Image: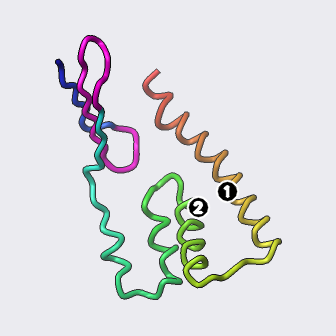
Amino acid sequence: MARVVVDPITRIEGHLRIEAVVENGRITEAYSSGTMVRGFEKILKGRDPRDAWAFTERACGVCTTVHALASVRTVEDALRFSVPKNAELIRNLMFGTQFCQDHVVHFYHLHALDW
C-alpha cells in the first residue's frame, strides 16, 4: 500500500490537496480537500443580501461573472423572484461569453505553460 499526496495543486484559484491510497497498482481511496478559507460567509454576515454579488464575484480572479450570477440567482430564489424572459436571455449570453473567455484563459495562461 502506498499513499500519494499532491499538495498543493497549483494553477487553480485557491489551494487544493489530493491524497490517494494505491494498492496493487489501483487507487483504492482518494480524498480532496480545499486548504484555503476565503471567509465570504463572515464578510457577508449582516449585509444586505442584494450586495452579495459584488463580493462573491471576487472569489475567483478568472470566472467572476459565474460567481456573481450564481449569487444573484441565489438571492432571487430565496425571495421567490423570477426574472423576465429577456433578462434570462441576457444572462445566458453572459454565461456563454464567460464560458468562452474562461476556457481561453485556462488554456493559455494556466495549462499551456506546462507543455
Q: Does the magenta stretch include residue 19?
A: yes
Q: Which residue is drawn at 34% across and 77% down?
A: 43
Region rendered in magenta:
10-29
Give the vertical position of 60 relative to 106 (above or below).
below
> Residue at (30%, 68%) from the top-left corner?
39
| Residue annotated with mark 1 | 95
Q: In this picture, is 26 found above or below 104? A: above
Q: In this view, does 63 lie to the left or right of 10?
A: right
The rendered magenta stretch, by its main secondary structure, is classed as strand
Identify the element where label 2 is drawn.
helix
Question: In this figure, which residue is indicated by the disc labeled 2?
Answer: 65
Which quarter shows the N terminus? Answer: top left
Residue type of the residue flagged with mark 1:
Phe
Q: Residue furthest right?
A: 86
In-image side of 54 versus 43 (left or right): right
Structural crowding at the residue carrying mark 2, measured as other residues with C-alpha within 10 Å and reported as few (<14), some (14–19) or many (≥20):
many
Q: In this view, does 92 lie to the left or right of 37?
A: right
* Residue 67 image offset from top left, x and y in percent: 52, 62
Q: Where is residue 78 in the image (x, y as percent from the top left)?
A: 55, 80
Disc 1 or 2, which lies upstream in sequence? 2
Judge whether residue 18 is colored magenta. yes
CA gap between label 1 and label 2 equals 7 Å
